[in-house]
Amino acid sequence: MPVQFYIPENQVPLEMHKVRVVQKLNLLPVGERLRAIQEAGNNTFLLQNRDIYMDMITDSGVNAMSDLQVASMSIADDSYAGSETWNRLKAAVKEVFGVDNVLPAHQGRAAENILAEAFVKPGMFTLMNFHFTTTKAHITRLGGEVIELVDKKGLIPQSDDPFKGNFDLKKLRATIKEKTPDKIAFVRVESGTNLIGGQPVSLENMLAVCDICHEFGIPSVLDASLLQDNVYFMKVREPRCKYMDTKSIYQLLASRFDIIYFSARKLGFSRGGFILSTDRKWCDQMMEFVPLYEGFLTYGGMEVRSIEAAAQGLLESLDMDYISQGPEFIEYLVKELDDYGVPVIKPAGGLGCHLNCSEIVPDIPHDQYPAAAVGAAVFIAGGIRGMERGTMSEQREPDGTERFAELELLRLAVPRRVFTLSQIKYCADRVKWVWDNRKLIGGLQWTMEPKVLRFFFGRMKEIGYWQEELVAKFRQDFGDSL
C-alpha cells in the first residue's frame, strides 16, 4: 500500500528500491528532434534510441531487472534438452500459478501464434473483451474473426469505474448462442486491456467468463501479460481481493482458466513467453507447434539466461512492493496531466498514461491519424517517445477501407523502476506545453503503408508545415533551452 507522507503536499509515489546501475541519456535540441521524427517517417517505432530522452513507447522488455534476476542469469544451464534452468522455471510457475504444465515460446506473440494454430480454423470466431494488434493478426490470417465484447463503459474515456476492461457478460452469452459454440475457437480475457488504456478486469468478471465458457464447452484463455498490474488493481479496488494474498489470486485464476499465456517481457520483467494449463490435454494440443516454430520444449527459442531471469521475475511478481511501482507512478502522471486539464484516460490503468487524442486534436479526422500526430508533437516538444494506439494501430478491412479506432490514444508507457520522479514531472510539463499549443498540430498521411501491422514500420509525412511551426513556437517559449 502507498506510504503516507506527514506533510500532504509532499505526497508522491515512494520507490521501494534503490538504483545501482544507470544509463546515460541524450536530450537533443528541438531542431534535431524535428529532424529525427521526420527521418523516422513520423513513426516513433523508427526513431533511434540515441535520439530519445524518455523512451515511453512500451514497458515490454525494457523494465529494470532486479539484482536477484541479474544474479540468477549467471547460473544458467545451457543444455539443449533437460536443462536445470528449465526445471527452475517450472518450479517458479508451480509456486506462482500452482500449475505443472508449461510450454515455452520466445515471446508473447509467439505464444499467440501457437494458440491460434492449435484452435483457429477458417470461419471460426474468437471472443475477447478487446483485441490486441498481434493477437488479432494471428487469428485473421488463419481465416478467423475477432469479436470484441468489452462492456460499453470501457469505451468512456473518463469515468470512475474501477474495472473498465470487464466483459459484457450478457453479450458474451448471446454471442455464443448466435454463433454456436462449435464455431467459437476460444474466449480470451486480456487482463489489462491494452488498446483502451490498460484498464483492468475484475476477478468477479473473469470467473464469470470462465463459468460461461465451461457451460458451453468453449476453451477459456487468459492473456496474463499485464496480470501483475491487474492483480494490483484487484487488491486496491475490489473488496473481495483486499484480504487475499497475491498468490491466492494467481492460483485461483489458473485453476479456473483452461489456458493462460503471457509475455515474460511484461509479467516478470525479463524476456520470453509461456503457455500453461492445469489440464495437460490443452498443452498436449499445442505442444507440437513449439519445436516447429520455436525450439525444443525446454527452451522454446529463448536462451537460458533469459529463462533464469524469467523464473526469478515470476517469483517477484507476487511482491506488492514490486508490482505497485508501475500503477502508482502511472497514477501520479495521470493526476498531474488531469490537473493541467490535459484529456487523459481515467481512472489510471496499467501500462502507462494514455492521452485522449480525440479531445486534444478534435479537428483532425481518423484518416489523418490524430494519435500519431500527437505522438510526433510530444517527441518534438521533449524527446519523449510514446506509442500510437489509435487508427494507425488498426488494420484495414478486407475491402481496403480504413477501420477507425474506438479510441485515439497516445500511450506514454512507464517502464518499471526506470524513470525518476523528476523525469515523470518533466514528461507532464512537456505534454502540458503540447496541450497549450494543440492548435498548431496537423494531420499525417502515408508515404509507405505495409499491409500487416503497419504501425511497426510504416512511414508518414506531415500535412502542411505544422511541425516547423511547432518548433518555432517552442523556441519562442523556451529560447535556447533543450
Image: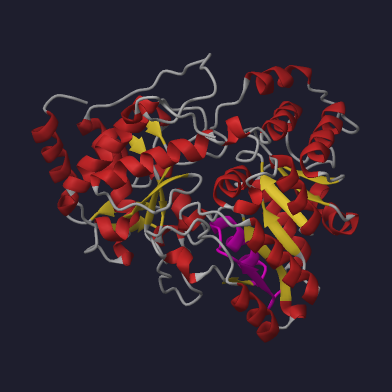
Please tell me whether residue 141 belongs to the stretch shown in magenta: yes
Where in the figure is residue 371, as x and y percent of width and height?
34, 55
Q: Quadrant of residue 256?
A: bottom right
Point out the image quarter for the C terminus: top left
Residue 150 drawn at (x, y percent): 54, 67
Q: Residue at the location (55% across, 27% down)?
A: 64
Q: Position of residue 128 (x, y in %)?
A: 61, 66
Quarter residue 186 falls in: bottom right
Q: Quadrant of residue 366?
A: bottom left
Question: Would residue 146 appear left or right of 305 to someone viewing this image?
Answer: left
Q: Residue furthest front?
A: 6
Please check the rendered image and state whether residue 130 is part of the magenta-colored stretch, yes or no: yes
Asked if one can make out residue 51 in the rendered structure from this viewpoint, the answer is no
Residue 254 appears in the figure: yes
- Colouring scheme applied when the structure was drawn: secondary structure
316 up-or-down from 180: above or below: above
> Which region shows up in magenta?
121-144
Q: Residue at x 47, y 37 (%)?
A: 328
Q: Is residue 337 left or right of residue 241?
A: left
As drawn, the residue found furthest toward the bottom would be 178
Q: Residue furthest top?
A: 20
Residue 263: x and y in percent read 65, 44
In the foreground, 342 or 223: 342
Q: Image height check: is 343 above or below 67? A: below
Identified at 69% across, 41% down, the residue is 246
Residue closer to the observer: 402 or 246: 246
Residue at far left of view: 476
Q: Quadrant of the N terminus?
A: top right
Q: What count of labels does the image hold?
A: 0
Residue visible at 54% across and 21% down in the picture? 17
Q: Is residue 278 left or right of residue 339?
A: right
Q: Relative to 67, does residue 246 appear above or below in the rendering?
A: below
